[in-house]
Image (cartoon, rainbow, N blue to C red):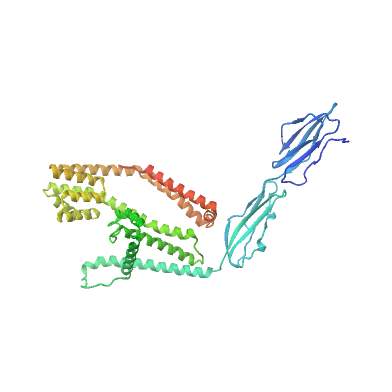
Amino acid sequence: MNNQSGFDLFETSTPTNEDVHVIFTPTLDVVKYQYQIIKEGQASEPIPVNTNRPVTITMTDTGNYQIRIVTYTHTASQEILSGVYEIDKEAPKLDVGEPIIQMIQGSTLKPLEGIKAHDEQDGDLLKQVVTNYEDLDFTTLGIKDLVYTVSDSAGNTVTKTVHVQVLENNQNILLATQIGIFIILLGILWSLLYYRRSVRLEKRISKYALEPLHDNSLSVLDNMERRYDSINHVIGNILNKSVFCQRFAKRYEKYLGIINKKYKRSMDILANKVIMGFIFLGIAIFSKTIQYQVLYIYEWIFPFLIGFIVPDLIYRYKYRAYRSRLENDLLQAIIVMNNAFKSGRSITQAIDLVTHELDGPISEEFKKMHLEISFGLSIDVVFKRFAERIQLEEITYLTASLSILNKTGGNIIKVFSSIEKSLFNKKKLKLELLSLTGSSKIIVIALFLVPILFIVFVSILNPMYFVPLYTTPIGIVLMIIMIVMYLVYIYFVRKIMKVRM
């Protein structure tokens, strides 16, 4: 017979990571009772039990618990308070730093340096951290898995692994090689600067010197350039056999005669991009070789793609500079031609006058027009070919005006004066637009560069920071998502900021 109400488990002596089940058994004289679960000092709603039967009270979540029970007999009531039940189901937090670290063969590693272990219930658990450091052999090359394990007083355990890459001790050789490469690069840079200075000096004094009758000798740089052009031509012939390459090379036809006078076909430009890709790949292979490391798959692909894309940036810059110079000089050409018409000269004479008065791309284009006229082409055809080459709206207006004048007649001076005024107003409006949108363009460029500069600076401060992005599957997925989002961001910002006249 029970003489006193009680719990089958009064309290827990140590924290547990399992559910706690407590059975409360009332005495025979208890008519009814109610119980409350007190968690972290906060009491729950009372739960009444209107019988004399035992009840099982279950506690599942992490925390400190107590049970308060009030029993009722026919004559009195009594309050019973249990001890403390401590439940801890949360695993400790273990911070091991970088997932991949490198060490030189033969050096020592402090396994607990920089390690942090903390538990909400037990506090600092650094002394409870266990590693397999003593079982690893760091005298041999390769990747070693350093395993960290920590457990709290409730039995919750967390394990993390750090990959330790043991590298060969080639610091002295690597340092000497790097110094040698630096000296070679300085020598090449000095040679280029000296050669450039010599060329400028030669151009300056050439008008005072007598040139030899026959001088077929080539300098070292000219010989290298000649060999490069021959290799570029051979690769272009190989690529020309592919239909895909032929279609891909058509997009570079607009660069012919602009970025390099030696390129006679768009396939030569594509071949130059391929060569640049292999040059960048060779630099990557060389940089890894002097570090006694091998290239991974992505380290083969990325340098080649960078070398393949970099020429596009140069071509686009040169083409834009060419177009900008052409647009700026077109107004001067119209003014020269209009003045020539006012003085009574013909269209052919006005075109020839532009070739002598102006220089740069506009002069080259008008020389082509003058040469086509001398070959017998009509004015309409010449200006139509000029408009197809340049593809400027102003040239289209000029071509249409000249065609109408040749067919119907009219005052060419008034027509050119109207075109001159229209071009002047458009150029003025364009300059005003540039001044108004200049600050926003600077902001957009800054927004483009901030992510790149952030990656560069963080990589300099901590070279291992971005390693998980390309060494783990989820990191590769996240990196692809970030690159796609960045490209989409650039596309939409350019579309929004682009202003057409």
Q: Is 75 placed above or below 319 here?
A: above
Q: Is residue 309 above or below residue 57?
A: below
Q: How many marks?
A: 0
Residue at image point 70% right, 50% down: 152
* Residue farthest along the left direction in this orientation: 344
Report the front residue among 469 and 205.
Answer: 469
The image shows residue 207 at horizontal and vertical percentages of 21, 67
Q: Quadrant of residue 356?
A: bottom left
Q: Quadrant of the C terminus?
A: top left
Asked whether residue 384 appears in the rendered view, the answer is yes
Residue 416 visible (yes or no): no
Q: Where is residue 488 shown, x and y percent of the image?
A: 43, 46
The quarter of the picture where residue 374 lies is: bottom left
- Image coordinates of residue 294 in percent, x first then y, are 50, 64
Residue situated in front as seen by the camera: 200 or 65: 65
Q: Farthest top residue?
A: 74
* Quarter in which the N terminus is drawn: top right
Out of 346 and 305, give the one closest to the viewer.
305
Q: Name the side, left or right, on which 188 lies relative to 46.
A: left
In the rendered view, would you say 494 is above or below 465? above
- Picture coordinates of residue 490, whole percent (x, y): 41, 47
Q: Is residue 151 left or right of residue 378?
A: right
x 25%, y 72%: residue: 216
Residue plotted at (48% across, 67% down): 289
* Residue 355 left/right relative to 109: left
